[in-house]
Amino acid sequence: MPSRYYRRNFVKDYFYHVYNRGANKEKVFWNKEDYRTFTDILAYYLTFPIGKPLSVLNRIEKKFSAENKVPNLADIPNSVSAVKLCAYCLMPNHFHLILKQVAESSEQNSVSNLMRRTIITYAMYIKRKYDHSGTLFQGKFKNVFVNSDSQLQELSKYIHRNPLEKQGSEPLQKYLYSSYRYYIGEELPPEWLDIREILGFFSKADTYQSYKKFVEKVPSETEQIKSIILE
C-alpha cells in the first residue's frame, strides 16, 4: 500500500502541505540566483500551467544557446491554473509549500503536474548551471491533506518559522526566500501568491500585526500538526 504522503488524489477547495528535500539531505539551493530561479519557475507554472519548460529556462538564462530565443509571452499557451500557492519557504536543502486545489484536477493542470514540472525544470537548470549529475531531489515530493482551519494556521506558522535558526538575531521577515514578509505587510505579494485566505483568520483591525504576533510570539503547536510536517 502506498504511503499516504504520496497519494495524489487532490480534492477541489482543500489545502495541502507539499515538501521535498535534496537527495541524501544535500543542498538544492546554493546561492541567491538558485532560490530566485526556483521561485521564478514555480511562478511560471502557476501562471502558465501548460507552458513549455524551455520557455521559462530561456527566460531565466538567455544564453543557453544562440539558437534559443527568449519566447514572447503571447506565444505561451494560456490556461487558468487549477492550483493556488498560499505560502512557501525555501531552505538550503528543502522546501515547503501550502497549495490549494481550487478547481478540478486534469492531467495537465493539477498539483501533481505543477510539482512535477517545477522540480524537473529546476533540476534541468541545476544540471546546466553546475554540470550536476545524478538525482537532485530525494525521490518524489511528499504531500499531505490539511484537516482543519486551525491546522492550516499552525502549518503556515511552522513553515514561516523554518528560517529561525538560520537567521540568528536577524528578524524573520529579512529572510528573502519565504512568503512571510508578504504576510506581515513588508512587501506587496506577487500575483501568483494568495495570502488572503490564511490572513482572513486574523484580526480585521490589524491583520498584519495579528499574524506577526501569532508567528513570532506564540510557540508552534507541533502536536496539532506533527502528522503533516513531513520532514
Image (cartoon, grey):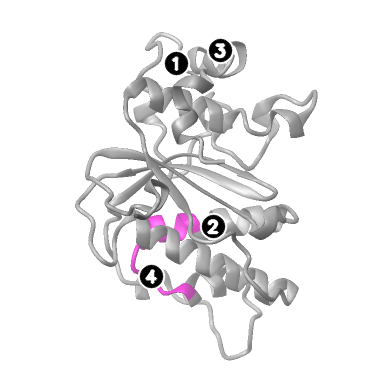
Q: Which residue is mark 4?
A: 51
User: Is any part of residue 220 visible from this angle?
Assistant: yes
In terms of image quadrants, where is residue 147? Answer: top left
- Callout 1 environment at 10 Å: few (<14), some (14 to 19), or many (20+)? some
Spatial separation of the CA atoms under disc 1 and disc 3: 10 Å
Of label 2 and label 4, which has the lower sequence position? 2
Query: Label 3 is placed on what type of residue?
Result: Lys
Residue ID at (67%, 27%): 172
Q: Which residue is mark 3?
A: 213
Q: Which residue is mark 2?
A: 40
Query: Label 1 is placed on what type of residue?
Result: Thr
Q: Which residue is mark 1?
A: 207
Of label 1 and label 2, which has the lower sequence position? 2
Report the magenta residues as a range: 42-53
Q: Secondary structure at mark 2?
A: helix
Give the answer, above or below, for where 2 lies relative to 100: below
Spatial separation of the CA atoms under disc 4 and disc 1: 35 Å
